[in-house]
Amino acid sequence: MHEKGIYIGRYTMPKDREYYEIRNPADTRQIISKFPKLARDDVKAAISIAKDAFQKWSKTLPVERAKILYKTAEIIESRANDLARLLTMEEGKTLNDSVFEVVRTANLLRFYAGLITRAQGKVIPSQDKNTIILTTREPLGVIAVITPWNFPLSLPAWKVIPAIATGNTVVWKPASITPTIALELVKVFYEAGLPEGVLNLVTGPASEVGDELVTNKEIDAITFTGSLQTGKEINEKIGRQNRFIRIQLELGGKNATVLSKNGDADLAIELTVRSAFGLTGQACTATSRFLVPEEMHDEVLNKLVERTKKVVVGNGLKNGVDMGPLASREQYEKVLSYIEIGKNEGAKLVYGGQPIRGGEEFDYGYFVMPTIFDQVTSDMRIAKEEIFGPVLAVMTYRTLDEAIDIVNSTEYGLIAGIITKDISEAARFAENVKAGVIKVNKPTIGLEPWVPYGGVKSSGNDVYKEMGEEAIEFFTRIKATYIGY
Ligand code: ADP
């Protein structure tokens, strides 16, 4: 019995809907679960239930909501190992990375539980006597949450948690390939005492389920993370409705790590390998371009290749594995096609570049070798487009200004790293690189829940940040109240 249900108010397993299979990307013979392909009417029902639930939930006291969030964190931690295993089996990342995601989710829960019990408004002096002006923050209503598969637990968590913590209700559509871990998160919330209808989970094709969520007039705000192309589509659909709702779009990156001639080359290699091939390159914050000073190129490239040879690829459940499979056939084909594109446009393939085959371990999974291209230039597609896989482009530069220009030469602007011991160089880099997050002597991947996150240019619509205290701004509106006495 692999069939699983969804939450339209309560947990339901629709009888008259087709169920589709979720398979393990490390071994596609293994079925993880089956989920219903919902139709528009199911989504409408979920939205209407969320709207009803909003009446009561929005009036609960922050301390009551905080209590549920703390309890959810406790249950999640008590099941960390089971949740992490399931996450690895469904998405493919290593068990360590899955545990990290589970822990991050518990941290997010506690962070927002604490935050919403703190002061949220201001008192503003009036020009009139006997007058108090104060601002309060109100929830918006029903939030549509649409999420990708690469962080199938913690990424939805950093949207859902601040949404419900501030008194909104949610209809959430997880990515089609990772609904099982999504369902577990929703279940835990209800076990912790969340009232029925506050968090709803719908699965099925983006063309119906996703489309209904972004076009339904009862939705008060949309938060989306995914590809640039889908983000643009959603933005257009909302534009056409001609109504003013909030929309938060987080869309990809083409992040660079720059090794300065004043930096520690071994550290740069270590951090770049971790940021490029960790999570199989399937992170918005992955390093996909590595910029090296011309005069250091040969030495650094040799060391980089030697270090990459040590990356152990395999089933994420196995001990000692550093890099799991790609998450789906679609991803696998996309990555292989970009490797062909790289070869055709004249970049030099110096490591990897092919699927891993042979034996039980690899023949049934979407395994690709960590791949390094050298002699990559800014005009190449592999230097400009988000591949979302373990493919690293090595590029050279002469001066820091030139490096900054190369970093800024893509349409994305999510995150950028520099490895240097020179503080003024680090400051110049941070000031002139167009990105939402700058890392000095740190890997581009990995961001803590209390840090505001979000990119510039085509990496997002750049209006609201996610995570940190700043997330509260998206999920609430400010009201000013005058009180005369
Ligand atoms: P990926 O599937 O690679 O994560 P996408 O940007 O295609 O990236 O999808 C991100 C999320 O958006 C998924 O949950 C997907 O089902 C959903 N989605 C895709 N297309 C649409 C659409 N046109 N309208 C609403 N949601 C969509």
Image (spheres, rainbow, N blue to C red):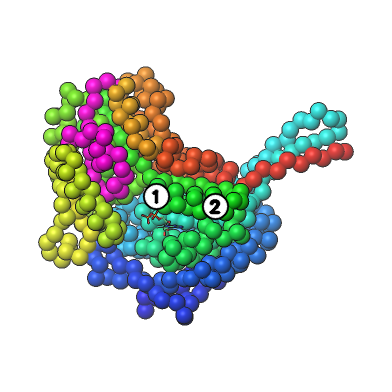
Q: Which amino acid lies under the numbered mark 1 shown in the image of this protein?
A: Gln
Disc 1 under 8 Å from ligand 1? The reply is yes
Look at the image and give the residue range highlighted in magenta. Answer: 374-400
For the residue pair 485 and 172, the one nearer the viewer reads as 172
Quadrant position of residue 51? bottom right
For the residue pair 411 and 36, the one nearer the viewer reads as 411
Left or right of 265 on screen, residue 239: right
Identify the residue position indicated by label 2 in the image.
240
Quadrant holding the N terminus: bottom left
Q: Quadrant of ligand 1?
A: bottom left
Q: Residues within 10 Å of mark 1 (few under 14, many from 20)?
A: few
Q: Residue at x 32, y 21 (%)?
A: 401
The disc at residue 325 is: none
Gap between marks 1 and 2, in whole Å?
17 Å
- Can residue 308 be seen here? The reply is no
Q: Residue at x 43, y 71 (%)?
A: 37
